[in-house]
Image: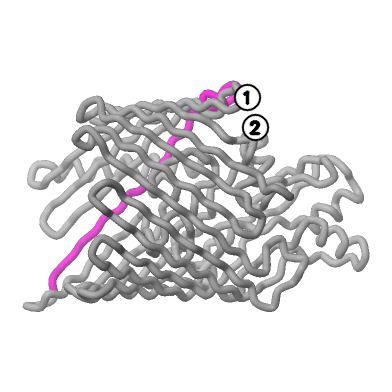
Amino acid sequence: MTKTFSFEKKVAALIALCLCAFNAFAELSFSGTLESKAGVQRWEFAEVKEKITGELNFYSGANSAYVKGGAEFDALKATNSSYGLSARLDEAWYSYYTGIGQSDWTCSVKIGRQIEAWGKADEISITDVLCPSDYTSLSLGSYADSRLGIDGVKLSAASTSVGLDLYWVPIFKGSKLPLDKDDRLRPSACPLSYNGIELNPQTNKPDFDAENMTWGARLSFWTRIMDISLYGYYGYDHKPVANMAKAISAMTLAPSAVTVELDYYKYKMIGIDAAIPVKEFVFRLEGAGYFDKAFSFTQEAIRKNFMVARASSNFERKNSINALGGIDWTPSWATLSAQYYARKIFDYNSSLDSYDFEQGLTFSASKNFLAETLSISFSAVLNLNDFDSGYFASIAYDATDNLKFTLSGQLFVESPWTVGRNYGKYSDYSAIYLGAKFTF
């Protein structure tokens, strides 16, 4: 952890130094935010954080660079452990573009840490698999706040109607999970325990070599009728599979202080999306096929397999298809959106910790008032398998051009007959948040 932080700090300092050196003949801008946020759940603090973020933009002809990072102080972690202050480097990249002869085509290369969004879906991941996610917070935030940047190279070629992006990611980065023992989300998001005994997680990341590199591609077409994009991905799943069979075997010898290994596995994805505008409406369609993706077994299935046959299986590779249909409506008085999503696993095995066919609905609405200084938003998601759900609301007021206050809340509701695998398991984390952000 220390080595990674030190490396990121040195890279950010080097890029900042280079940008300052070119300031005499280039455009250089700096901006940032100071943010304070506190949340309460069941008369206890759910979150108390102070965050500073800085962005550095550099332009010089066909050259550009961008650095975004910051530091965060988590007061709750500071009271439960010896640390509460952390630093991060969200993005740090250099880009160069050039035209192709007298045509309308341009080519560009972007090198470094970058966040790339795939797909047309809101909040639901169908084709959006390139960047890992941050699962350590349930509070509302922007897309960039919920994603981690990839360290790689992006090659692009585009005209006014066609665009091609190729991605090469030589360095693997998994999603950020709440694995610390003092992390309040760990019992629900990562319940690493067996028979009431907490297990110590050990992440086994893929080695740095040619076989473990990730490749991605996006081909886009922009027409008057619709926008269409095709996607391809070959690389590791950003979420690991817990090797519970090995942990159960170890517990038969030593029932305490057992380590559970978290392993990552490769898979392939091919996807497509489309956005079709019709007057005040935009219809969104998205679908993806996942091939050889590792689906975890339930802990009970792993235990039975081990006890009966001494089997060490933790997962099975399956093919699946994910699909989504959505509609956005923007009348003069509000912005409304609704989505239906589904996933089907082929050659299903009842031992899997996933449904054979999973589906759900989402809805969101937002409205601006007082010359757009006051905004109100609401969103909801309902899983149609367990009928557990989540609800999110926010009121934001721009007191000045630089100061914004936000009051938000989230409510997670359990299924009438079970806890639920998606949103009901977070029912203890329903909370109200108050925040302030100063932009400079």
Colour theme = one colour
Q: CA distance from mark 1 to mark 2?
A: 7 Å
* Relative image position of residue 210 (x, y in whole percent): 50, 70
Q: Is residue 184 above or below residue 103?
A: above
For this view, does 63 lie left or right of residue 182?
left
Name the mark on residue 182: 2
Judge the density around disc 1: few (<14), some (14-19), many (≥20) Cα neighbours within 10 Å: few
Q: Which residue is mark 1?
A: 80
Q: Is residue 36 above or below residue 209?
A: above
Location of the N terminus by quadrant is: top right
Q: Quadrant of residue 345?
A: bottom right
Q: Secondary structure at mark 1?
A: helix
Residue pictured at 26% horizontal, 48% vertical: 66
In terms of depth relative to the viewer, which is nearer, 242 or 428?
Answer: 428
For this view, does 102 lie left or right of residue 85?
left
- Please name the amino acid that badge 1 sits on: Asn
In terms of depth relative to the viewer, which is nearer, 145 or 103?
Answer: 145
Residue 414 is inside the magenta segment: no
Q: Is residue 77 visible?
A: no
For this view, does 42 lie left or right of residue 256?
left
Judge the density around disc 2: few (<14), some (14-19), many (≥20) Cα neighbours within 10 Å: some
Determine whether label 1 and label 2 are within 8 Å by CB. Answer: yes
Instruction: Specify the segment rendered in magenta.
Output: 73-99
Q: Quadrant of residue 96?
A: bottom left
In terms of depth relative to the viewer, which is nearer, 111 or 118?
Answer: 118
